Image (cartoon, rainbow, N blue to C red):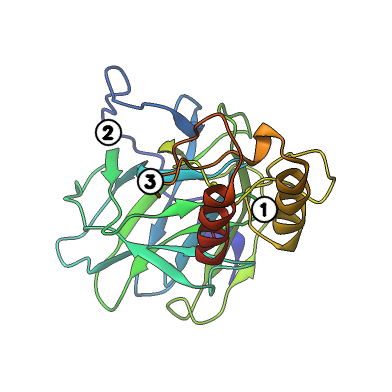
Amino acid sequence: MQQQSMRLTSLIVGTALFSGVAAADPLLDNLDQPIRGVTILGTTDPDRIWAAQSFGTQTRVILDSIEVLLGEATPDADAVMELHSGADPTGPLLATFTIPAMIDSGVLLTTLVPDTAVQLDPNEYYWLVMGCASTGSFGWAYAEGNIFTGPGYFGNYYYSGDSGATWENYGGDNPYLMRINVSPAPVCIADVDDGSGTGTPDGGVGIEDLLYYLTVYNAGTLAADVDDGSGTGTPDNGVGIEDLLYYLQRYNAGC
């Protein structure tokens, strides 16, 4: 596979309506950057490729949608659009996206909505994977430069020449154009410490959380006040056995 055939493709761009686009609480956004080119994801040489762009978050959030610039599509494009997690795009499949209508000339802003609720956790890479299963092709635009806004971050992008079975790392410069819209994740009662003993959550639940909670519970401090006996996670400004029972329940549930 040659990087030139993957990245230096059509530069024709349709009218992308960037103004007025709903983008509440974007995790990551580089849609205001210039378009460097459009990668054609097809099923015949030299465009027999899939692409995957990785990204991450520093806080636990819920994925609402991903906006991308898509187009240059053939009528028979049987597109695949998926979200994976892990060290590379072969990691676990988290969600698929309903295949949107795509224009046949240029690229337009397109919103991808996951078919199931997805929680994005810190210290994890997530991969937007796209390609065509067996027929046709479509294009995905990528940026000129590495500027973006938001608390999230881009990782590298990968390409596959065998429909996602194996992947090759092509680096991180000029990532794909995308806006990742998220909402705050529910508070995780069981996440109370990162191992430092300072009561700092870290976005995960482990033995350090249990040990910290038992310390503050035994000390009777209000940091251990997590429930009033109703089982709803409502503090009552006191520490009793109901708090310990509720915390253990949430710890065993992983949040």
Residue at x 59% of width, y 40% of height: 59
- Where is residue 19? Give x, y as percent: 30, 17
Q: CA distance from mark 2 to mark 3?
A: 56 Å
Q: Mark 3 or mark 1, which is nearer to you?
A: 3
Residue linked to disc 3: 230
157 left or right, relative to 234: right
Circle number at residue 14: 2
Q: Mark 2 or mark 1, which is nearer to you?
A: 1
Q: Quick one: label 1, few (<14), some, or many (20+) residues within 10 Å?
A: some
- The reply to whether residue 107 is visible in this rendering is no
Residue linked to disc 1: 123
**Quadrant of residue 179 within the rendered picture:** top left
- Where is residue 40? Give x, y as percent: 39, 58
Q: Amino acid at mark 2?
A: Gly
Q: Amino acid at mark 1?
A: Asn
Assess whether mark 1 and mark 2 are in contact (beta carbons under 8 angstroms): no
Assess whether mark 3 and mark 2 are in contact (beta carbons under 8 angstroms): no
Residue at x 44% of width, y 37% of height: 234
Q: Earlier in the sequence, mark 3 or mark 1?
A: 1
Looking at the rendered structure, the secondary structure element under dot 1 is loop
Q: Amino acid at mark 3?
A: Ser
Q: Earlier in the sequence, mark 2 or mark 1?
A: 2
